[in-house]
Image (cartoon, rainbow, N blue to C red):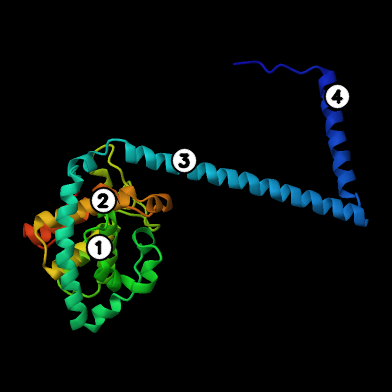
Amino acid sequence: MYAQKEKPAENKSSAVAHSVAQKKTSVNKSISFEDNRPEAVSQRKTEMLARKHATEQRQSIQRKGSSRQNYVQRVIQRNGKDVIESTVLDQNTEAVKADVDIAMSKIKFAVIKLSFESVEVANALKNSGRDWIVYAPLISWFYGIGGLIIKWNNTWPLEDTAGLLIDLGIALRKISTQGQQAQFLMNAYMKASRQSNKKIDKTSEWATDLPEHTAMQAGVSASTANLLKMIRMLDVNTPREIEAIMNGVILYWKNSKVKQALGQFHTAAEVWAAYTYHLEKYVRKTPDSGTPRAKL
């Protein structure tokens, strides 16, 4: 054991003196009177505003730093090698656009026809859409989704066509009543992969099953699931065209500076999860029971 070394007497005296001085200071503070002269009050207000301004500046810098850090992280994810994206994304964007344009021509005809037959569909198409500000700024206010469908042609960029398709899927998501059981399972599947703030839950089974370096943002894409549900309802597309649309959707979120800056985007893995579920439930005809097997 270490023996306790006794401090010199002068140190103890100094400590006592220091303690007494602190008590005196405390007493003096407790009995001090506030200076309420106008110039003193004005000085205190000025100092208080200065401290508040300094605090707000620090908080602003911290927020900007945090925002910058999140942006850098997204850039790293986007520019780094994403295993899923590099596997599923077709690099021949001209061929992808050609297939998407063929599919969109069929969808356009089917939607316009349906809008004349159903008041519910016609009313749903009057909305401007959620993401119009990205692919059709201002014009959507005047025409709504239905008007944009009529105006669409193959001169539209691939990403803009994909944006319109996403909004169309969201607008018509309540129209089709087919496949309710599968839709219920898909909804549970999507919710299990995200948090209450609609960001990815990296501890979820879906996220932990993904390969290393897979970019993740908001969990399995509900918007993609709605789009696929609409495509099934219209029954106008071949598997090749549907896969091209999935590529277009990935590129829409990947290349949109607005959606990236707002953090309102999905990654390739999150789009392909909804597509894989579509394949297993509606194309490969797997049993409609239990939790969806689609992991990508």
- Of the residues shown, which amino acid type is indicated by label 1? Leu
| CA separation in Å, label 4 and label 1 | 83 Å
- Of the residues shown, which amino acid type is indicated by label 3? Gln
- Of the residues shown, which amino acid type is indicated by label 4? Ser
Tell me if label 1 and label 3 are in contact, CB under 8 Å.
no
| CA separation in Å, label 2 and label 4 | 76 Å
* Mark 4 crowdedness (10 Å alpha carbons): few <14, some 14-19, many ≥20: few
Tell me if label 1 and label 2 are in contact, CB under 8 Å.
no
Q: Mark 3: which secondary structure?
A: helix
| Sequence order check, earlier mark of 2 and 4 | 4
| CA separation in Å, label 4 and label 3 | 53 Å
Task: Name which quarter of the figure residue 188 lies in.
Answer: bottom left
Q: Which residue, given by chain and number where applicable, does mark 1 sit on?
A: 165
Task: Name which quarter of the figure residue 80 lies in.
Answer: top left
Nearer the camera: disc 3 or disc 2: 2
Label disc, if present, on residue 250 of the rendered structure: 2
Most extreme residue toward the right, as rendered? 37
Q: Where is residue 200 in the image (x, y as percent from the top left)?
A: 34, 51
Q: Where is residue 193 in the image (x, y as percent from the top left)?
A: 29, 53
Residue 34 in sight here: no
Q: Position of residue 233 (x, y in %)?
A: 15, 70
Residue visible at 65% across and 49% down? 56
| Sequence order check, earlier mark of 4 and 3 | 4
| Sequence order check, earlier mark of 3 and 2 | 3
| Sequence order check, earlier mark of 4 and 1 | 4
Tell me if label 4 and label 1 are in contact, CB under 8 Å.
no
Most extreme residue toward the front, as rendered? 155
| CA separation in Å, label 1 and label 3 | 32 Å
Q: Which residue, given by chain and number where applicable, does mark 4 sit on?
A: 13
Q: Mark 1: which secondary structure?
A: helix
